[in-house]
Image (cartoon, rainbow, N blue to C red):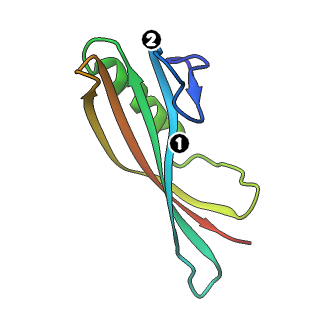
Amino acid sequence: TALVGSAVYDSAPAGIVSGTYVSLGPEDVREKSDLTGYGALHEITVSVVTDEAGFRPAKEVAAAVSDALVDASLILARGSLVYLNFHRARARRVQDADIRRIDLTFRARVEDN
């Protein structure tokens, strides 16, 4: 949060937002049970959005987000986290190229216990 302060949202804020923020995005979940028990594979998207010129500021925030999440020891309300890994990223200009957006996708394997 040092790079974006409190600008981390569960969904994209309404209206025009200046500066840089992080938004928790969509999630796809697939069943991944095996012989040891029930489980799921989550594909989670975290977006970095900025109106700053160039991609460098957004990429710095994206790297910090990835560093914070990959292999983090997160406590879940149900089940246990087996792993949380970076899967892919997509950087692009949006809204007539005035906004830069990087969508980071992470894969998390969760076991139900």
Q: Is residue 113 left or right of residue 57?
A: right
Q: Is residue 45 above or below residue 14?
A: below
Amino acid marked by disc 1: Leu
Label drawn at residue 18: 2
> Residue 41 location, x and y as percent?
51, 66
Q: Residue at x 34, y 33 (%)?
A: 102
Label drawn at residue 69: 1
> Residue 93 location, x and y as percent?
25, 27
> Residue 28 location, x and y as percent?
48, 59
Q: Secondary structure at mark 1?
A: helix
Amino acid marked by disc 2: Ser
> Residue 23 location, x and y as percent?
51, 33
Q: Is residue 85 left or right of residue 95?
A: right
Q: Quadrant of residue 13?
A: top right
Q: Residue at x 72, y 51 (%)?
A: 75
Image quarter where the C terminus lies is bottom right
Q: Which is closer to the viewer, label 1 or label 2?
A: 2
- Looking at marks 1 and 2 on the same chain, the residue that comes earlier in the sequence is marked by 2
